[in-house]
Amino acid sequence: MLNKASSAPPGARLTVVLVILLLRLLWIPMASAEERPNIVLIVADDIGYSDFGAFGGELETPNIDALANAGLRFSNFHTAASCAPTRAMLLTGVDNHRAGVGSMRELMPLSHRGEPGYDGVLNDSVKTVASLLRTAGYRTVVAGKWHLGIEDYNLPPARGFDRSVIQADSGSDNFEMRPYLPMYPEARWFDDGERMLSLPGDFYSSRFFVDSTIEFLQATRSEGKPFFAYLAFQANHLPLQAPAQFIDAYRGRYTQGWSKVRDARVRKIRALGLMDTAARFAPGPSQAQWDALTPQEQYFEARRMQAYAGMATAMDHEIGRLLTYLRESGQYDDTVFVLFSDNGATGTEPYDNAFGRRWLESNYHREVETLGERGSWVAAGSQWGRVSNTPLDGSKFSSGEGGVRVPLIVAGLPSITPGEVNREFTYITDLAPTLLEIAGLQAPFTVPGGQTMTGKSLLPVLASAAAAPLHGDDEAIGYEFSGNSALYRGRYKLVRNQPPAGDRQWRLYDISDDPGETIDLRERMPDLYQAMLADYMAFSRDNAVLPMPEDYSVPKQVMINTIVFFYLPRYLPYAGLLLVLAIAVYFYRRVKSRNRTGH
């Protein structure tokens, strides 16, 4: 064969060479097109709409802002108003009721417990994006807050993650292994599905989560597979905590008060083009409210916001370390980044009752000069919460825009025009199909015998700023959690909140022109109001949404659920043992008494 080939005419040999070169030229682009990008999914916790610099805030978040400037910002992106339902929809692409998280165990009425959609954890009818990506050949890692169940079938190893280091509750202390609320008898951490008994000596949550992610990426890089990294920070969830240097960098700031900080954010939001210059914004705290405080009260308020800002900047610093690793290892240009907050900033401080205050005082300190440092417990409070959610109304747990509209950044796709802003309505269930299509998987995404993802991929929007809106004017998207409800249709939103956030009355808003929800349109647009109310009722039926009990009270239910779900399972075995011992003692004394009396 070799002899025959070598004796072929020069023209024939040239033809063979050209054919080989042509095949190589054709093959190389094909191989390149089939390469799948890495995906980094970053979820901040309880960050308000305008906290990041790229969304109007004065918080120092240079790494997050750089991603925003290199990518696309979504200024009309909506989640659930609380962490667990958002995370359920994020990872499954279906409504939180269909995923099993119609409510959280911490808040769920006992009459809802066990009803379809009210597992309080992910159910068996859904698969996570991690499971689908791992099947498609991705390395998968999660580090951070989980809050989707601690059963074996619900911990990350059973939900598609090769590597996992998680905080399983709604939150915890950020420096030590201890709970942050009296409802939790302990802080539950898991390493690859096994309970962790201790944390590293130099532990700080944000740093630990990034360390764990980088360690996994380094250890598995030789496998030659793309990765999916889900990084779920506890920042800025209660308690506000950060290493001292990040909080100290803000000393002397926020002393001008809530109103002036908010006014600066409003100006910047309009300048950045996040909302129309004529859009109506919700009112914020007044300067008179600030001026009415004593100097000591003003100082405390400034210090608590310094702790809030320091915690966000510490998170940004750790994100920067991950970005540096990816750049230095040559993986940055092959990585897509998706970053958002799980809900709006909280507007309350939990310890407004005697029991909470006693627990707090016995477990944490509130010394003003070391607020936010190890051992302290502080929240930003209701007025700074309103500032964080500028220019929106409402806060975490509320279905008002301040509870459900959050910053979203997508960067790393070549099709994105850097620095652009998308103002069209998008929803949390849209992220799961987006992540899967980025990885090259094709819709529809259906679990055999289970759910079909209802969200829509953002790729058309990411590919062209001129793309049609993802959700049409006639498409109805419903939401409900703990009785707080919303129905979105185009630019309009129907919304209802339970006490204490609302009065159980439905209201209609145009959230494009009126993101502050200042003008109720029910009477001006009665036909639309009735049509959207019918849409919500259909959503409620289709997703088995249960009505809230008339006497439902959040504080009362939290107290009941604390005993039923967290303390009884832990101490019931001991109570049973004490009961057996008591019965044994009772019969022992009876026998002894009979022996004495001769009966």
Image: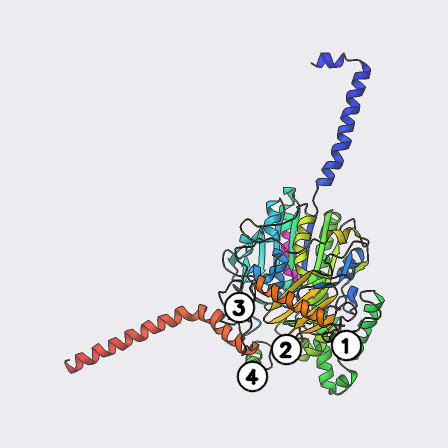
Q: Which residue in the protein does label 4 denote? A: 354
- How far is disc 3 from disc 2 in space, using C-alphas? 20 Å
* Residue 391: x %, y % from top left: 76, 72
Specify the amino acid type for callout 4.
Ala
Q: Earlier in the sequence, mark 2 or mark 1?
A: 1
Which residue range is magenta in the image? 206-215
- On the image, which quarter does residue 392 sit in? bottom right
Label 3: element kind: loop
Q: Residues within 10 Å of mark 1 (few under 14, many from 20)?
A: many
- How far is disc 4 from disc 2 in space, using C-alphas? 13 Å
144 or 278: which is nearer to us?
A: 278
Q: Residues within 10 Å of mark 2 (few under 14, many from 20)?
A: few
- Mark 3 or mark 2: which is in front? 3
- The disc placed on residue 254 is 1
Q: Which residue in the protein does label 2 denote? A: 349
Residue 210 within the segment the image draws in magenta: yes
Specify the amino acid type for callout 1.
Tyr
Q: Earlier in the sequence, mark 3 or mark 1?
A: 3
* Tag 4 near tag 1, CB within 8 Å: no
Q: Earlier in the sequence, mark 3 or mark 2?
A: 3
- Mark 2 or mark 1: which is in front? 2
- How far is disc 4 from disc 1 in space, using C-alphas? 29 Å
The reply to whether residue 174 is visible in this rendering is no
Residue extending farthest to the left is: 598
- How far is disc 3 from disc 1 in space, using C-alphas? 37 Å
Instruction: Specify the quadrant that holds the N terminus.
Output: top right
- Mark 3 or mark 4: which is in front? 3
Q: Which residue in the protein does label 3 denote? A: 105
Specify the amino acid type for callout 2.
Glu
* Tag 3 near tag 4, CB within 8 Å: no
Q: Earlier in the sequence, mark 4 or mark 1?
A: 1
- Mark 4 or mark 1: which is in front? 4
